[in-house]
Image (cartoon, rainbow, N blue to C red):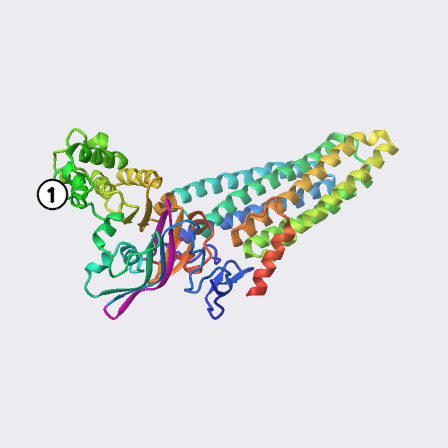
Amino acid sequence: MEQVVNDTSAVTQGSGLVVDAAVIEDRNAEGTVGEIYVDDPRMTCRNVNVYYGDKQAIFDVSLDVGKNQVISMIGPSGCGKSTFLRCLNRMNDTIDICRVTGQIKMDGQDIYDGGLDVVPLRASVGMVFQKPNPFPKSIYDNIAYGPRIHGLSDDKPHLDSIVENALQKAGLWTEVKDRLDQPGTGLSGGQQQRLCIARAIAVSPEVILMDEPCSALDPIATAKIEELIDELRENFTIAIVTHSMQQAARVSQRTAYFHLGKLIEVGETDQIFTAPRHQLTEDYITGRFG
Amino acid sequence: MNEMTSGHIVKAYSAELEHLNKLVLEMGNLGQDQLRRAVQTLKDEDPKSAGQVIDRDRQLNEIDIQADEEIIRLIAKRQPMARDLRDILTVQKTVSDLERVGDEARKIANLTIRFYDNGKTPPNKETLHDIYDMSEFVDEMLGRSLEAFAELDLDKALEVIEMDKKLYEDFRGSLRRLSTFIMEDSRNVGSVVDIVLALRALERIGGHAKNIGGFVIFLVTGKDVRHVDIQAISDEIAASRVAD
């Protein structure tokens, strides 16, 4: 940590008090306000930069993701929050022009190590997308697919128990247990999204990444997913990108605010939504700019 | 429109917050006027005007209800966060304190009626001086707390909180002085008890002004200063200015 003294961006909080962002003591070397470190991190990201060809999308982001915590990433469209999320399981590798620098570790292991196999990495760091994307297979096979290809189960009874356990944890078991052979695509939108979460859980990940998981769902289905996220926290670490600030406030313990590819502020969710310290965070969450 | 309420992409949101803040100031001015009028009825020995002060308290109650309704609507519609959330919480608490300022002013007006209506025995005039002196001090506290709210002025907010200490000392001093009137002549007991209740009402108005000062600090800085040593808060605010 070091104090940045040449930054002139002022945080105006009423005529009686002007706090200069440059003198906020725990502003770290990369310019982020707030505590980027946690005591018990599952993932540690240091000086992460992401480029799409010549264009830089993420600038020098350092951030810890705490074990059994939900961290929300918020910010206006194009701020880089989804790009950063996709760095956490190397999903950006699938884009030819994308280049990532810096260091991202999970449990001390550098996930960008040249010798690392990304297939088990993506099982350890599962992902749930904006639109539910079940495979065109039965509900059972949607869940069983991962354990099969990762060799997590040798026999049918064991696979059955993995499927049931994943559906139980995703809160879907009672709704689908009598129609496991039906197509996953026949479920409602909310059920499909919980099926995708069950599919991610089935390969025993440590971290689950969620990229706007409720943006295509109605309020009831959204509430079920949010309840599920809270329950999953007991066993998994979750990083979620959301456009709904109320959702970030409801489901996460820490919140990170991104703006134009930079991590502006990170802190306890309660603090971010009641008394943010950076003017840009304040302006965004109070609806003063888009 | 001040910096606390303005600047939303949805302009109606800024206008709603602004209206709430105006209601607070309207209510504050009315409460301060009620205090002045109530004390004046005592000076003028005018029970008829005292009755008007009591009737006028309804206006404060109506604004209190109106503000609460608007706050509920605004929370449901806008889901305020950060400074907007602090602003709304501050308005709600301030309005509640100002409604009680009106109740205390009504008590003083009632005293005028008890002393001077229908040829009742008036009190020894010497015993009333403390009410006049304390009412001026409390009036100043209330005015300064409203200025602090309107201008988001931390210095004025801190001053009001500091003034409350002097008010409490003055209140204790008055109690000691009034007890001598009782000791000198036991016929003063009834009127002195009424006067002590009026002083208590004034002391409470000062307490409400102090609360408003604390709410302003919460609004501007996000720090809850209730039950906190004010010197520590003052030092922290001063330190942040030095850093700036």
A47 vs A156, nearest the viewer: A156
Q: Residue at x 45, y 66 (%)?
A: A9
Q: Specify the quadrant that holds the C terminus of chain A.
A: bottom left
- The kind of residue on which mark 1 rests is Pro
Label 1: how many residues lie within 10 Å, few (<14), some (14-19) or many (20+)?
few
**Apparent side of residue B118 relative to residue A242 in the rendered image (left or right):** right
Residue sitting at x 52%, y 58%: A14
**Residue at 40% over, 46% down:** A253
In the figure, B149 relative to A55: above or below?
above
Could you say whether the residue bearing mark 1 is in a helix, strand or loop? loop
Q: Is residue B117 above or below residue A79?
A: above
Nearest to the observer: residue B10 or residue A157: A157
Q: Which residue is mark 1?
A: A136
Asked which quadrant contains residue A114, the reply is: bottom left
Which of A65 and A213 lies nearest the eye of the viewer?
A: A65
Q: Is residue A23 above or below residue A239?
A: below
Tell me if residue A247 is in the magenta stretch.
no
Q: Residue at x 50, y 58 (%)?
A: A13
Give the x, y percent position of residue A240.
31, 49
Please identify the quarter of the rendering in which residue B176 is found.
Answer: top right
Q: Which residues are magenta?
A: A53-76
Q: Position of residue A99 (x, y in %)?
A: 25, 65
The chain ID associated with circle 1 is: A
Q: Is residue B156 or residue B235 the one in the foreground?
A: B235
Magenta segment, principal secondary structure? Answer: strand
Q: Position of residue A238 (x, y in %)?
A: 32, 47
Q: Is residue A119 visible?
A: yes
Answer whether residue B128 is visible to the viewer in this image: no
Residue A283: x, y in percent? 41, 57
Magenta stretch contains residue A67:
yes
